[in-house]
Amino acid sequence: MRLESLSLQDFRNYEQVSLELHPGLNVFVGENAQGKTNLLEAIYVLSLSKSYRAAHDQDLIRQGALRAQVTGRVRKLAALEVGFVLSHTDRKRLLVNGKTTTAHYFVGNLNTVLFSPDSLQLVKGSPSERRRFLDIQICQVDPVYRQTLLEYQRVVRQRNSLLKAAQENRAQLSQLPAWDQQLVHLGTKVMLRRWAVVARLQEHTMAIHGQISREQEELKLVYHPFFAQSAPKQAQQDYGEEELNDIFWQQLQFWRAEELRRGYTLVGPQRDDLLFFVNGLDLKTFGSQGQQRSAVLACILAELELMYGETGEYPVVLLDDVMSELDQGRRLQLLTLLNAKAQTIVTTTSLASFSQDLLQRAAVYTIQRGRIV
Ligand SMILES: Nc1ncnc2c1ncn2[C@@H]1O[C@H](COP(=O)(O)OP(=O)(O)O)[C@@H](O)[C@H]1O
Ligand SMILES: [Mg+2]
């Protein structure tokens, strides 16, 4: 799929911009703090209904303006328009073809994959970043998963409040079984879906990483469930829903006293992780920076293939200032691989990272203080 055009009104530091995008490579060049990331952020919100870097939707409204509006025309088999309106006085409005809709129907119309310097933390950073990496791609292609995940997160929050309250008043514990039931039911669904996606990602990363490392190294992705520590043998197997349910209940028993003592939930996929191994060694601990970068690159490219497999369309790829982070070889590999498949929107402070050959086939825009000049 591609984003054919984009218009921003009072979004971040943009007053008013409308532009047509190239179906292949789009390069936005500009100095720091001119609005490069803001532009990609707008596209990201069109895709996922909220920003990855704003605490409040209102932060996205241009200082001094009352409302922000962003619209994009998407082309896949059919054409459609997605948009959103933010205001200081009303609730956020998500729009598909001009009609207000819910996030449930909004997410998935425009699929994106974002690669930013923060993505390089995927291997080294905290488990929550790796869970997010998985969840963001699954949510875009599977609205049912998105709903299950949101529901599950609500259950964890409620259950946490209950455990906290029970520290003061044991009588509260009578409500716990009802929450346990939901925790296990929804948590199992979340885990099974992630597990399946990791298996599919694994096939793609293996192939892509082989190319990147010239078949010198083998990258392996392993889903690491929350019970891997307390029941390591169980963590290595493949499970059906019923078996996983049973383990979940056992874990609840096992951690019950500790949960009561600490006052929050200790079991469930909010504590799962994703591990990376290169030639059998844990990449987080033993990998060089170069190896970690290759792995991240392979994962992002694999994400593309996964989404293609699920929807029949490649997502739009957003590359925020990553060219300078990659060496010449990886840079070229990335852009060449992408160019053949997916519409790519890149920001950079310097065109020097791009070959003449690539630039000739790209649309190049200069961003200056929230304007495309
Ligand atoms: N809500 C807002 N209203 C006006 N300006 C904003 C808003 N949010 C961020 N900015 C401005 O946007 C600029 C940063 O844009 P950004 O896209 O992150 O820069 P870069 O080009 O380095 O990626 C800063 O000058 C910041 O002050
Ligand atoms: Mg930036």
Image (tube, rainbow, N blue to C red):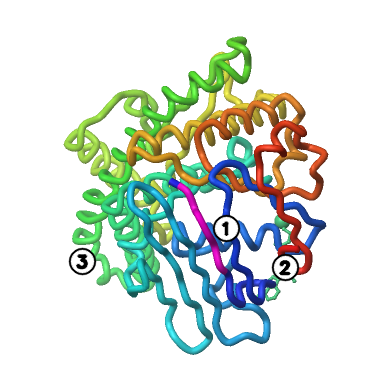
Point out the tag, 1 or 2, that comes first from the N-terminus: 1
| In the depicted structure, whether residue 278 falls above or below residue 85 | above
Point out the tag, 1 or 3, that comes first from the N-terminus: 1
- Label 1 or label 3, whichever lies nearer to me, is 1
Horizontal and vertical percent position of residue 319: 63, 45
Looking at numbered disc 3 in the image, what kind of residue is underneath it?
Answer: Ser
Residue hosting label 3 = 174
Q: Is residue 79 shown left or right of residue 370?
A: left
Do tag 2 and tag 3 residues touch (Cβ < 8 Å)? no
Do tag 1 and tag 2 residues touch (Cβ < 8 Å)? no
Q: Nearer the viewer, residue 151 or 267?
A: 151
Outermost residue toward the front? Answer: 360
Horizontal and vertical percent position of residue 285: 64, 28
Outermost residue toward the top? Answer: 216
| In the depicted structure, whether residue 282 falls above or below residue 90 | above
Residue hosting label 2 = 371
Residue hosting label 1 = 20
Query: CA gap, disc 1 to disc 2?
Result: 14 Å
- Residue 37 placement: quadrant: bottom right
Query: CA gap, disc 1 to disc 3?
Result: 59 Å
Horizontal and vertical percent position of residue 59: 60, 75
Query: Does residue 118 appear in this view?
Result: no
The residues colored magenta run: 2-7
Looking at numbered disc 1 in the image, what kind of residue is underneath it?
Answer: Glu
Residue under the image location 49 percent in, 44 percent down: 133
Q: Is residue 323 shown left or right of residue 94?
A: right
